[in-house]
Image: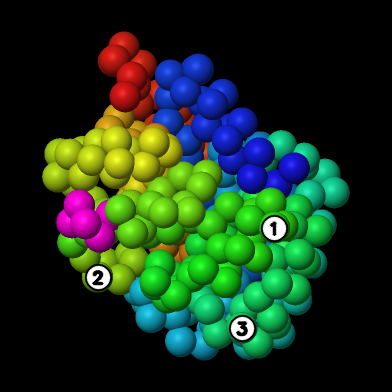
């Protein structure tokens, strides 16, 4: 069913009149066993969709928090094969929550694009975000994912003009990921009033839900974005929670899921009493 899960989830949330909360975590952070526990607990804590990063040694779009998460995962032996194993394990107990992989092209080329698309679908993956794959060079990847029933989810940015946006949204499915700030993850903060017109423009051009990520760390910021977008994505704050729990010798899973719960509650209540987008 793959990409059908994404469409079904956004349709259900639209009917409820609320935005989605999307939780990003790094596969294998801080280790495979703990990552599996976090992944399994995300839906119950309030995550409507999950982005699972696969660690890469040179994550060019990521700020320090996610860079460190990737380093922790790599140091503990996480691989792309291990990432798919985590996805497969998650899918054994959860058949409803959309799961999107996010990472970089090098590893997919090494695996083999067609083989990876097939194996990702078999593991229960619904979508794929490849940060460093420009649309002009994505046809082979798009073909492979279409054949496997996996959504190719592309990034739009504040610098994406109307002409560029037409290229970005071609063959995009599931949703469009709008990068709210220029630069890397986890550094600047997203401003809802600045983001709102861009979200409306991307939604109109694509006909797809628009998820906003980069620069959302607090429940207040997540709620503000949820009032103007179809989804709010949080990543750096969650991987920071991993690092903080390790430093304080606390339960990593408990701390991460507590953070997810507070963010998800803010997103769920953001539009109460307001007209939906």
Determine if the magenta segment contains residue 95: no
Judging by the rendered image, the residue that carries numbered circle 2 is 183
* Residue shown at 21% from the left, 57% from the top: 163
Q: Is residue 138 above or below residue 5?
A: below
Which quadrant holds the N terminus?
Answer: top right
Is residue 260 in sight in this rendering?
no
At x 57%, y 77%, the residue is: 55
12 relative position to 209: left or right: right
Stretch of the chain drawn in magenta:
161-165
Foreground pick, 112 / 143: 143
Upstream in sequence: badge 3 or badge 2: 3
Crowd rating for badge 2 (residues with CA inside 10 Å; few <14, some 14–19, many 20+):
some
- Whole-number angstrom distance, CA of label 1 to CA of label 3: 17 Å
Instruction: Identify the disc placed on residue 70.
Output: none
Element type at mark 1: helix
Mark 3 vs mark 2, CA separation in Å? 25 Å
Q: Quadrant of residue 116?
A: bottom right
């Amino acid at each position: 069913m793959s990409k059908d899960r994404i469409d079904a989830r956004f349709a259900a949330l639209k009917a409820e009149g609320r935005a989605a909360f999307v939780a990003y975590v790094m596969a294998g952070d801080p280790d495979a066993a703990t990552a599996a526990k976090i992944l399994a607990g995300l839906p119950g804590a309030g995550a409507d969709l999950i982005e699972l990063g696969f660690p890469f040694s040179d994550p060019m779009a990521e700020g320090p928090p996610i860079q460190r998460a990737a380093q922790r995962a790599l140091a503990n032996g996480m691989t792309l094969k291990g990432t798919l194993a985590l996805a497969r394990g998650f899918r054994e107990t959860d058949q409803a929550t959309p799961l999107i992989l996010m990472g970089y092209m090098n590893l997919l080329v090494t695996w083999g694009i067609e083989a990876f698309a097939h194996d990702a679908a078999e593991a229960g993956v619904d979508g794929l975000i490849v940060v460093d794959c420009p649309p002009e060079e994505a046809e082979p990847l798009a073909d492979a994912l279409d054949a496997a029933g996996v959504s190719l989810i592309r990034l739009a940015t504040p610098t994406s003009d109307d002409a560029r946006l037409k290229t970005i949204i071609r063959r995009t499915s599931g949703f469009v990921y709008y990068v709210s700030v220029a630069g890397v993850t986890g550094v600047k903060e997203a401003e809802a009033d600045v983001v709102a017109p861009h979200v409306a423009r991307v939604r109109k051009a694509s006909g797809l839900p628009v998820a906003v990520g980069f620069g959302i760390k607090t429940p207040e910021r997540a709620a503000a974005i949820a009032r103007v977008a179809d989804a709010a994505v949080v990543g750096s704050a969650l991987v920071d929670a991993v690092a903080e729990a390790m430093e304080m010798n606390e339960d990593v899973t408990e701390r991460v899921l507590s953070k997810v719960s507070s963010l998800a509650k803010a997103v769920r209540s953001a539009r109460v009493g307001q007209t939906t987008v």
